[in-house]
Amino acid sequence: MAGFHRLRYALAFLVLTGTFRAAAQDPSFQASVDRNPVGVGEELTISFTLANAGTGGGKNFKLPDLSRFRTLSGPNQSTSMQFMNGAMSSSVTYSCMVQARDAGKYSIGPATIDVGGKTLRTNPIVLDVVKNPQRAQQSAPDNAGGQIAENVFLRAIVSKTHVMQGEQINLSFKLYTRLTVMNYAVEKTPTMTGFWGEDVETPKDVQLSTETVNGKQYRVGIIKRTALFPTQSGSLEISPMTLQTQIQMPAPRSVDPFDAFFRDPFGRTTNYAARSEPVKVMVDPLPGGAPPDFKGAVGQFAMSTSVDKKTTRTNEPVSLKVTVSGTGNIKLLEAPALELPADFEQYSPKVQEIINRQGERITGSKVFEYLLIPRYPGMKVIKPVTFSYFDLNRREYIRLRSPEIELNVEQGTAPAVPLVAGGGREDVRLLNQDIRFIKVRPAAFVRQGEYLYNSSGFVLLLLLPLAGAAGAYVYASNRRAALSDVAGYRNRRAIGEARKRLKTGERLLRETGAKAGGASKSAPRFFSETAGALWQYLGDKLGIPQAEFSVERAAGALADAGTPAPLVQALRTLLETCDMARFAPTSVDRPAMQRAYEEASRIIVELERTLNAQ
Amino acid sequence: MNRVLLAVLLCLPAALSAQAPEQLFAEGNQAYQQGDLGKALGLYESILHNGYVAGDLYYNLGNAYYRSGNIARAILNYERARRLMPDDEDLRHNLQLAGTMITDKIEPAPRLFLWDWWQGLKDSFSLLTITWICYGCFVLFLGAFCVVLLGRTYLLRTAGLWCAGVAVLLLACTLLLMYVRVAELHRTDEAVVMTGVVTVKNSPDEKSSDAFVLHAGIRVQLIDRVGSWVKIHIADGKVGWIQENGVERI
């Protein structure tokens, strides 16, 4: 019907624009309503038409204040074009469908639009909204809307208008009728911003009951039931639902039998859009003091946990199921966080939910299945899983705790799957480790900046072997100098060498003594050694080479060296005795050998004393 | 952290009455074992205040800071301990673990494998050990020198000469090692970031553009200084300027 009015208006407009085209080449912007006066609760269309705007059209269209009306749709834009006498004219119409709420005279203010840099305003319209719909319907005698509106209406009913966030509200749309509703279809579903809505199952056939409203009996059918859970606090609105109904109108009683005859005995059917009123719900926020793991669950819940196996191997997955069941906003439940041993790998949980939509309350359960992969063997403990919710009956937060879950992880053979999570392998290896214990051994304290290498003690310690080496060097260089002085060397060694040979003589003497009569046998060797000792001594001491040695030369040298003459004489005698005994051994006996030995010893001692005394 | 500081301040008078560091150390260890971290920190710090240092002391101090949640200070003390005892296995482990706790994960710029070998060799002995090895080489060289001087036989003298040659070579190597370690001990260009979050600037100026952001606990190298600003270099090669009070020298 509204469509018809729009059409009619548009036709009228076209006629008008056509008529006054010559005079109205400038762009025009005009407002109009499809009927005036209008009844309370009736629809009307307000149109704003821009004509001759040229090719640029209008920009920045602004509606006037329509807050005293309920906007049903719009603004909708429609464009029409026409050619007349070869000239094209176009018009753009912005239309709004509104419903008047209260009776009274309303002024619809100007709408504005910018065309070619100029702002155009519409003429204000005074709209008369009247209480008596009968009068309002004068302009539309065919419309039985007012009559229908009295007998057929849709109501949105909420179980509560003041709830806590997350508390369930039952919203039902009831169709009240005193007429026969042939058919109905939902034209516009309500929008429920700020709610999570779960449609409750309603029987396929609408169950009718009887209710009395304002003293009239109505048959009532529940069209739609929804369980709502507010997800935010504040004042929330549930927008209206529109139901398109097909109603059989009762045949008006007529006194005219002809009239009655030609009329449809079952009356006419007519279409009627039943619209519910918007519903406001006050939602209180949840009280403070929520546990840290509270994630918005409100209602009454129970939790259980289970693992598919208690014993597993490394790198073999274990499935941990956490089931939360109960009454409340099941769909909004979030997976509880697990506190796993550090070397466990966890994948995001698989979620399965079962929601029971029958009955007054939404019940159901949600299963979170976690896949866990232990990486290292050992007895592993998964800390209790916790789940918090707000209990509406007790008005407090409840925290559920599962028991601890123990897992025995054995060393498996399956190779480790590359780690998904960030962080290097090194980090992962250290995850489960703690710092090593402090050092309790006696610490070696030093004064700040004082170390062994720069301590005076160490310098001394360095000097010690250096001094040793220096000493060795001095000794070695002395020895080398001594070795290079042959005469001095022989001189110093003379007495030692002589003693060595005399020792041999002494040994031979003792042997002779032991074997009686053996003197003749060992005598030559004895005298040879004794003489050798003397010669060598003299050679060394006087610096005479062995080849040039003779008794005469030795005696001369000794005399030069200031040796007393008797000593030189004794030396001569002894050497002669030795020579004789060497070539005539039979002439000597043991006492002679003894004497010779003693004489040799005495002479060497005497010589050493006199020669060294110089 | 304030509690810890308070404990440090409370323990300062005790530190001033110069006690034997060994005794303070033992008391600190006892406090640590009883879980009284504040007291342990105070006692350890008082030893440092008295002018004594030891690798073990810095290590324990690092552990105490780690336990009290101050990872940056723990890393600073572990780094200080490392200068004194780089060969300590526990220290290496703890330092690595503390490194995983800090926010910044910096991949060090790759180096030649020889560098790693050298680092391993350099850090495989304490400075004290190196000093003694050096001394041993010195004595060995002098001993061999004496043998060369005094050897009675040709064979002995030849052996002595070879021995002295080897000893000189060893001595040169250990001296080099010791020099590097001593230089490392006294270097002042290494620091640890102490401020929780610090924005590194492109130039030493508050209005300069931001280069990158560092978090507490990261080790940086100081390469230049202008006023209260220091130029830092981090392991992955990035360079920037920060306020000097944001870092503490190792």
Image: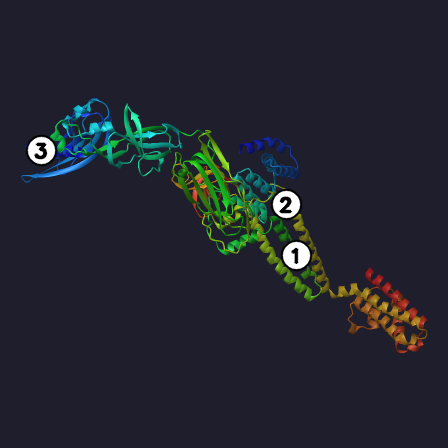
- Residue for badge 1: B140
Q: Do we see residue B19 in this rendering?
A: yes
Identity of the amino acid at label 2? Ser
Mark sitting on residue A455: 2
Tags 1 and 3 touching, CB below 8 Å: no
**What percent of the width, then of the height, locates residue A427?**
50, 48
Q: Quadrant of the C terminus of chain A?
A: bottom right
Amino acid under label 3? Answer: Thr
Q: Is residue A239 above or below residue B138?
A: above
Residue denoted by label 3: A17
Instruction: Please identify the quarter of the rendering in which residue A574 is found.
Output: bottom right
Chain of the residue on which disc 3 is drawn: A
- Local packing at callout 1 (Cα closer than 10 Å; few below 14, some 14-19, many 20+) is many
> Disc 1 to disc 3, how far (Cα)?
122 Å
To the question of a shared chain for discs 3 and 2, the answer is yes
Residue for point 18% across, 26% down: A38
| Disc 3 packing (10 Å; few <14; some 14–19; many ≥20) | some
Image location of residue B97, percent across then percent down = 53, 45
Instruction: Mark 3 or mark 2: name the one nearer the start of the chain.
Output: 3
Secondary structure under tag 1 reads helix
From the viewer's side, name the closer residue of B35 and A379: A379
Residue occupying image coordinates x 65% and y 48%: A458
In this picture, is A37 found above or below A499?
above
- Is B9 displayed left or right of A240 in the figure? right
Q: Secondary structure at mark 3?
A: helix
The amino acid sitting under disc 1 is Leu
The reply to whether label 2 and label 1 mark residues of one chain is: no
Between A172 and A229, the one nearer to me in the picture: A172
Q: Chain of mark 2?
A: A
Query: Which dot, 3 or 2, sits closer to the camera?
Result: 3
Residue at position x 47%, y 53% in the image: A417
* Number of marks: 3
